[in-house]
Amino acid sequence: MNESAPAHRDFVRQIVEDDLKTGKWDGRVQTRFPPEPNGYLHIGHAKSICLNFGIAAEYGGKCNLRFDDTNPEKEDTEYVDSIMEDVRWLGFDWEDRLFYASDYFEQIYQWAEELIRQDKAYVCSQSLDEIRAGRGTPVEPGVSSPWRSRSVQENLDLFRRMRAGEFPDGTHVLRAKIDMAHRHMLLRDPIMYRIRHAEHHRTGNQWCIYPTYDYAHGQSDSVEKITHSICTLEFENHRPLYDWYCQALGIHHPQQIEFNRLNLTYTMMSKRRLLELVKGGYVRGWDDPRIPTLRGLRRRGYTPEAIRAFCGYVGVTKHNATMDMGVLENHIRTDLNKRAERRMAVLDPVKVVITNYPEGQSEELSAVNNPEDAAAGTRSVPFSRELWIEREDFMVDPPKKFFRLGPGREVRLRWAYFITCTSVITDSQGQVTEIHCTYDPATKGGDAPDGRKVKATLHWVSVPHAVPAEVRLYDHLFRTEDPDEVSDPALDWKSNLNPGSMQIIPHAMLEPSLGSATHGDRFQFERLGYFCVDADATPEHPVFNRTVTLKDQWAKEQTKG
Ligand code: ATP
Ligand code: MG
């Protein structure tokens, strides 16, 4: 996976290299990707996957896939399965190292008893509100819980009875006994276990107490002998606690390293919000091509190669920032430019009649499949008397700067002939219904033997040979760069959803070779962008998604204006 390695050595790789030099971990590099199975993976997770699996591969190490499944109410095997599929699709392999935090519940429990025996943990019987209030503020110390001085014996007894299911939810918690005046609020006797009489997707009803993220995460890392526990910046202030548990227990102690989350303009990565969009019917599902889930991007036509290259390009830093969506789009353009075969398709068709081309006749013309890839060869495209061209490629009364077709003008039809417009037929509303042209048989292939030039080359599709198809065009999911930017405080982020984020063209016209395209095939439609066959497509009803336009749309609008 070398494309995911950035050109310069980032600070995480620098730490790994330094550790290899000093022999800190006996030459081992062991990382993990630790998703919570409570949603589908998005492109932010891809950054973490590329980093963890990438570093392991680059330095002769291993990377585990570990489900951080300590929150039974929100988790589901549906998510477990989708996460595995998406990590594989992205191109990474955990081999035989598939783990679950729930596999370690017994060990994690035993370590909790160990902390109780050391008088470093106690059962607290305050309510969650009382515990919160007792924590103090960043400038005021907290106050000790009245249960803080319970004896080791009493704590052990209560904790075992918590496990045995004797108490209802919310009656007791296990807390680490650290320091109620600690300058890090998170170290003011944090909760280690809570009572949840909930069924877990893997352990069923075996447990009714569940460890908190902070307690379970580091201990899971420790069990797996992780060397570098790489996570996102919001966990930076949890690191002292991560370190405290490992030190207090005297167990293998990985180094936690924090990097910046990926954020992109005009979209968002919060699993909670993505869930809201899916459950609320704002989008068509977890694989809606407008959302940044890996399934959505895949359905949109993104390739794993482009996503890995993008993740390598954005790199890792210690500062949160928002990346321009255009940067992601450029990576898929670069990738597809090399490998997507070119085809012709007309999205908004208007008919051209070549009046000097014999009725009932047609011919096969040769078209280059990919100018970037000689091995892609050529295909034949049928030409006939009646053709579809793009409505916007014609104007009855073109202004000076419009170089495409108009009365009396000559243009080139891609891979075909020069044509000249001789007359136009319009309906009662002035809408163009037919454009009459003549063609110059001497310009076959697209060049004039007398050397005369034309200013435009249009794409086209032969009317009797055309394959009608549904084409879906996409725009940003949100109208604003930052979905949280609302003008009225009564509105929420959903008010910024872009109502025009999907445009469906029911009757586009495609060149006949596209009729045999199947799900997942990718093409460049000349002048229109990169497209892929959608999962909804059938042989009777082809459906294509536009992955991305050929040029940055924003840049195009700038020149238009
Ligand atoms: P959310 O905060 O939306 O609930 P999460 O980040 O907690 O999601 P996890 O399943 O815990 O989701 O994430 C697994 C790993 O992916 C974590 O190590 C997390 O730091 C990393 N990750 C999640 N989102 C991003 C992001 N936007 N950029 C980089 N890494 C991310
Ligand atoms: Mg998380």
Image (tube, rainbow, N blue to C red):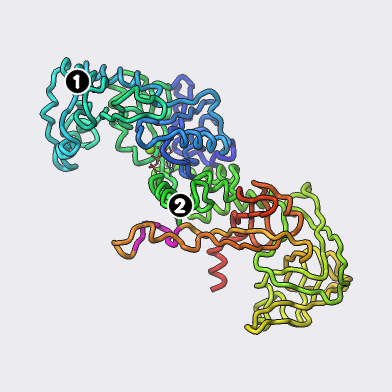
Q: Position of residue 493 (x, y in %)?
A: 37, 57
Tell me which corner region of the image, top left, top right, bottom left or bottom right, holds residue 555: bottom right
- Residue at 64% across, 54% down: 543
In the foreground, 382 or 552: 382
Identity, as a three-letter code, of the amino acid under mark 1: Leu
- Residue at 57% across, 54% down: 330
User: Can you identify the residue that label 1 sits on?
Assistant: 158
In terms of secondary structure, where does tag 2 sit? loop
Residue range (magenta): 478-486
385 up-or-down from 250: above or below? below
Q: Position of residue 172 (x, y in %)?
A: 20, 28
Tell me which corner region of the image, top left, top right, bottom left or bottom right, holds residue 463: bottom right
Identity, as a three-letter code, of the amino acid under mark 2: Leu
Residue 283 seen from this side: yes
What secondary structure predominates along the stretch shown in magenta? loop
Residue 175 seen from this side: no
- Residue at 50% across, 54% down: 325
Q: Position of residue 283 (x, y in %)?
A: 47, 53
In the foreground, 332 or 152: 152
- Residue at 36% across, 32% down: 72
Between discs 2 and 1, the one toward the N terminus: 1
Q: Report the quarter where the N terminus lies.
A: top right
Relative placement, left or right, of 301 versus 74 is: right
Q: Residue furthest front?
A: 540
Tell me which corner region of the image, top left, top right, bottom left or bottom right, holds residue 357: bottom right
Looking at the rendering, the quadrant in which ligand 1 lies is: top left
User: Can you identify the residue that label 2 sits on?
Assistant: 264
Q: CA distance from mark 2 to mark 1?
A: 48 Å
Marks 2 and 1 in Cβ contact (< 8 Å): no
In the foreground, 557 or 462: 462
CA neighbours of label 2 inside 10 A, class few (<14), some (14 to 19), many (20+): many
